[in-house]
């Protein structure tokens, strides 16, 4: 009975009529949609449901960009989607989604949602829970930006648009749906997302959307650090990380994301180093080559580690313990705003700890570096330091030749020990038979 009522609301609750764009106007043909997304829409339609490809996939296809994945929105309840699809699994607790599996593709299927009043943080106004089924019109209204509220019907090859998202795409602007202040207060991450989309697509943020960002930037501090990290990672791996970080600073959002960016820009070598790291990352992503998030975050925070390391040595601490303590200091500062996962921080520490080891090119120590599991990343980091002017170019070139060289070449490259440098004395093994095992210790009486 309850399901039947919900189904009626989902199907007949829409009052406002959308703008309908045929294929001749938007240019998306059915064969541009992935097999899995088309199949989901076809199966649900055959059971009397409405189903559309929605969100970023429609936006990207209209801009001539191949989407990485396809999402589907429908009036079918999650349990109904799960029942109709052959290979599917239900996920989520408060608001269930369905993952429909097709060979190497996973299509995420969601039921239309409404922006009904949920649980709100009284101090910040941020919506903590907002999981209510609704109509397609309500689903469009609760999405963040107009360009992400476009619904494509593979059966008719039409795009449904409730909020002039097609017009905004043509004007190359990012515009939020509804009142910007209210929407940013509901979810402050939308401010970061606006900057990321503008940087990725080379769009401008619409003036009304942009106006309250700077004064509301502090709200990002109320967002769980893990969510901020996820959004930051998307920005850094968008292929437009350099322009993205510039826009973050321009909008005053960097304080809630990477507070240390301010300090980086105060140091000429640090600013050049970060700019080169971002440029290399963007180039690799655009060339469809793999990138390492750990390497990128290590580059962003390196000069803070360097400054903390020098400060500790200045207070008389030994170099190696001082370096590891400096790493922990810098990473601890980031915990409150950016929850970098431990799997990344472990790699970052390995990259950082290799840098002083590259300074030693005598004896057997360089051969020990060759066996390090992060040698490639550590050397790339050294090469980046050399290119920025922080490390000697000759040092990076020496290690390149040493890594690539034959045993004979490596032996020739080794530098002589500095005058007066003490050789490490090996302990001589004691000759003669080993002492007899004394056996277990005596048991003392109570």
Image (cartoon, rainbow, N blue to C red):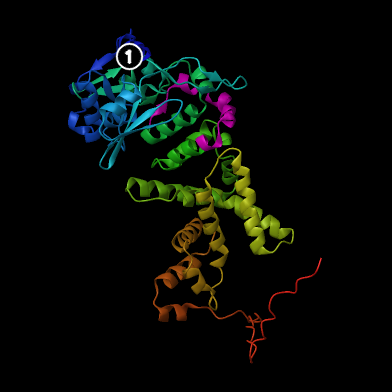
Nearer to us in this view, 132 or 362: 132
Disc 1 target residue:
7
- On the image, the x and y values in percent for residue 39 come to 22, 30
Q: How many marks?
A: 1
Is 384 above or below relative to 46? below
Question: Does residue 315 appear left or right of residue 393 in this picture?
Answer: right
Is 392 above or below relative to 276? below
Label 1 crowd (10 A; few <14 / some 14-19 / many >=20): some
In the rendered image, which quarter contains the N terminus?
top left
The residue sitting at the top extreme is: 15
- On the image, the x and y values in percent for residue 284 come to 36, 50
Quadrant for residue 70, please give it: top left
Nearer to us in this view, 48 or 245: 48
Is 169 above or below relative to 134? below
Q: Is residue 232 visible?
A: yes
Q: Secondary structure at mark 1?
A: helix
Q: Is residue 272 visible?
A: no
- On the image, the x and y values in percent for residue 296 come to 48, 49
Nearer to us in this view, 410 or 4: 4
Residue range corresponding to the magenta coloring: 203-228
């Amino acid at each position: 009975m309850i399901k039947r009522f919900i189904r009626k609301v989902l199907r007949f609750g829409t009052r406002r009529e959308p703008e309908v764009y045929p294929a001749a106007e938007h240019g998306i043909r059915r064969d541009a949609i992935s097999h899995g997304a088309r199949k989901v829409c076809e199966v649900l339609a055959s059971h009397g449901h409405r189903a559309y490809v929605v969100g970023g996939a429609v936006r990207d296809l209209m801009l001539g960009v191949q989407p990485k994945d396809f999402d589907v929105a429908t009036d079918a309840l999650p349990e109904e989607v799960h029942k109709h699809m052959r290979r599917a699994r239900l996920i989520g607790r408060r608001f269930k989604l369905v993952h429909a599996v097709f060979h190497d593709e996973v299509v995420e299927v969601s039921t239309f949602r409404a922006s009904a009043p949920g649980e709100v943080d009284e101090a910040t106004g941020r919506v903590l829970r907002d999981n209510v089924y609704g109509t397609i019109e309500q689903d469009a209204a609760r999405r963040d930006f107009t360009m992400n509220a476009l619904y494509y019907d593979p059966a008719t090859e039409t795009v449904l648009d409730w909020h002039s998202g097609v017009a905004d795409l043509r004007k190359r602007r990012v515009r939020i749906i509804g009142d910007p202040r209210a929407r940013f207060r509901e979810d402050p991450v939308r401010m970061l997302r606006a900057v990321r989309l503008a940087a990725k697509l080379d769009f401008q943020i619409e003036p009304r959307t942009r106006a309250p960002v700077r004064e509301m930037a502090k709200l990002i501090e109320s967002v769980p650090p893990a969510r901020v990290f996820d959004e930051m990672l998307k920005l850094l791996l968008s292929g437009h990380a350099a322009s993205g970080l510039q826009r973050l600073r321009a909008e005053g959002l960097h304080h809630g994301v990477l507070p240390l960016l301010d300090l980086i820009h105060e140091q000429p070598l640090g600013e050049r180093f970060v700019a080169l790291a971002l440029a290399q990352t963007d180039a690799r992503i655009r060339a469809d080559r793999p990138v390492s998030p750990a390497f990128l975050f290590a580059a962003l925070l390196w000069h803070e580690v360097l400054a903390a390391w020098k400060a500790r040595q200045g207070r008389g601490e030994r170099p190696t313990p001082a370096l590891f303590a400096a790493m922990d200091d810098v990473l601890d500062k980031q915990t409150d705003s950016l929850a970098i996962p431990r799997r990344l921080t472990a790699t970052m520490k390995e990259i950082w700890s290799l840098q002083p080891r590259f300074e030693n090119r005598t004896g057997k120590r360089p051969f020990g570096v060759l066996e390090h599991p992060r040698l490639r990343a550590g050397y790339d980091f050294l090469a980046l330091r050399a290119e920025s002017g922080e490390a000697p170019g000759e040092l990076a070139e020496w290690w390149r030749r040493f890594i690539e060289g034959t045993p004979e070449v490596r032996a020739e490259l080794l530098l002589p020990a500095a005058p007066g440098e003490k050789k490490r004395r090996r302990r001589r093994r004691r000759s003669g038979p080993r002492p007899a095992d004394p056996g277990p210790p005596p048991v003392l009486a109570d």
